């Protein structure tokens, strides 16, 4: 049995019906997601409603790194001094179709993304999951789940050790 809500985006998914209310996120799934997957720029995971053949939501993951100097001192002191940047997993986009908003779908999709990121981090080093919230609504959403703002950046992160506690 699949332990995830999501599966990799493929040609059977009905992308044209998706609408989350954010044109940037809608356009991404319509026009760019397939190309990013083909170019190995990101992996796009979709949560499909097979009864309606509609995508409930999607997120993207990719490898990333962040400079050590944008992390708070209390986290930075745990990193060996030889590192000027640290490996992370970028949760680049996360969107819920408007038909499924307000039903904890965003929370479930985030948990799916964090679980997948944690599992991947066991075989490919990743210190944290990074997000770059699109707006204040998204920032509030990630704040609610413990994401920490990075110094002088719009980005936020959640350490993999914190994520590990959710799944062990």
Image: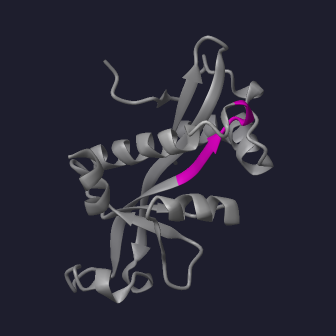
Question: Where is residue 74, by image quadrant?
Answer: bottom left
Residue 95 highlighted magenta (yes or no): yes
Query: In which quadrant will I find the N terminus?
Result: top left
Residue 142 highlighted magenta (yes or no): no
Residue 114 in the image: state x and y as whole percent.
39, 48
Can residue 39 be seen here? The reply is: no
Residue 85 in the image: state x and y as whole percent.
35, 76
What is the span of residues highlighted in magenta in the rendered image?
92-99
Can residue 79 be seen here? The reply is: yes
Residue 116 in the image: state x and y as whole percent.
36, 42
Question: Where is residue 35, by image quadrant?
Answer: top right
The secondary structure that dominates the magenta segment is strand
Left or right placement of residue 13 versus residue 82 in this view? right
Q: Residue at x 30, y 49 (%)?
A: 118
Left or right placement of residue 26 versus residue 58 in this view? right
Q: Residue at x 48, y 39 (%)?
A: 108
Q: Residue at x 40, y 81 (%)?
A: 71
Viewer-side residue, 28 vs 100:
100
From what the image shows, is residue 11 above or below residue 117? above
Residue 91 in the image: state x and y as whole percent.
50, 53
Q: Residue at x 76, y 25 (%)?
A: 17
Viewer-side residue, 24 vs 146:
146
Q: What is the number of callouts on the image? A: 0
From what the image shows, is residue 35 above or below residue 133? above
Viewer-side residue, 8 vs 168:
168
Left or right placement of residue 7 versus residue 23 in this view? left
Left or right placement of residue 116 versus residue 5 in this view? left
């Amino acid at each position: 049995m699949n332990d995830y809500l999501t599966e990799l985006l493929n040609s059977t998914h009905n992308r044209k019906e998706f609408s989350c209310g954010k044109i940037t996120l809608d356009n991404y799934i319509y026009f760019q997601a397939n190309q990013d997957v083909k170019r190995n720029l990101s992996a796009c995971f979709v949560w499909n409603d097979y009864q309606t053949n509609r995508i409930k939501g999607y997120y993207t993951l990719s490898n990333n790194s962040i400079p050590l100097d944008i992390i708070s001192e209390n986290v930075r002191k745990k990193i060996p001094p030889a590192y000027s940047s640290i490996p992370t997993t970028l949760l680049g986009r996360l969107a819920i179709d408007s038909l499924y908003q307000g039903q904890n779908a965003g929370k479930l999709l985030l948990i799916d993304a964090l679980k997948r990121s944690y599992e991947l981090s066991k075989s490919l080093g990743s210190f944290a999951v990074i997000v770059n919230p699109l707006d204040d609504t998204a920032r509030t959403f990630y704040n609610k789940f413990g994401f920490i703002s990075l110094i002088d950046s719009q980005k936020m992160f959640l350490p993999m050790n914190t994520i590990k506690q959710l799944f062990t």
